[in-house]
């Protein structure tokens, strides 16, 4: 019984040490996942359309570096011009406004 308790103690200590050694980027990504967007998708759409008037072809909420770590991403089109507009889900700030080719990546 003592041997079992010792082994459990060693295993618990090893798990705690491994958790403490997680890279900071992983820890910050987990923190971003726990956040709830302060800006709604509807409000972010309006910001994106003001940034690049056109048609929203694809939209998603994603976790990426920069800003608060959580953003709305919009693939947009106007005529033959494509743009990706990223809006910070916590502040509403435009984080990305980049030209894309005719076949934007997924």
Image (cartoon, rainbow, N blue to C red):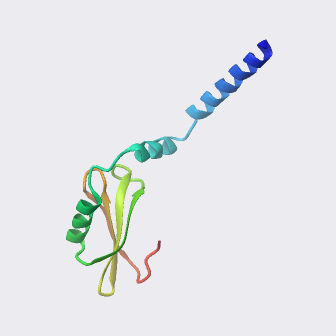
Farthest bottom residue?
A: 80
Counting labels gives 0
55 up-or-down from 27: above or below: below
Q: Residue at x 62, y 33 (%)?
A: 18
Residue 103 place in picture, x, y as percent:
44, 81
Q: Residue at x 49, y 45 (%)?
A: 25
Farthest left residue?
A: 50
Q: Nearer the viewer, residue 97 or 19?
A: 19
Residue 81 place in picture, x, y as percent:
32, 83
Residue 23 is left or right of residue 18, and the answer is: left
Residue 99 is left or right of residue 44, and the answer is: right
Residue 24 is left or right of residue 16, and the answer is: left
Q: Residue at x 25, y 78 (%)?
A: 54
Farthest front residue?
A: 1
Farthest top residue?
A: 2
Residue 22 is left or right of residue 103, and the answer is: right
Residue 93 place in picture, x, y as percent:
25, 57
Image quadrant occupied by the N terminus: top right
Q: Quadrant of residue 19?
A: top right
49 up-or-down from 81: above or below: above
Q: Nearer the viewer, residue 8 or 14?
A: 8
Q: Residue at x 35, y 57 (%)?
A: 71
66 up-or-down from 12: above or below: below
Residue 75 place in picture, x, y as percent:
36, 72
């Amino acid at each position: 019984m003592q041997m079992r308790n010792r082994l459990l103690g060693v295993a618990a200590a090893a798990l705690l040490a491994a958790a403490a050694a997680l890279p900071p980027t992983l820890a910050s990504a987990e923190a971003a996942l726990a956040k709830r967007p302060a800006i709604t998708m509807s409000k972010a759409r309006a910001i994106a359309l003001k940034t690049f008037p056109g048609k929203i072809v694809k939209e998603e909420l994603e976790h990426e570096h920069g800003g608060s770590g959580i953003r709305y991403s919009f693939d947009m089109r106007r005529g033959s011009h494509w743009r990706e507009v990223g809006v910070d889900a916590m502040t509403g700030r435009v984080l990305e406004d980049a030209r894309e080719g005719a076949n934007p990546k997924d």
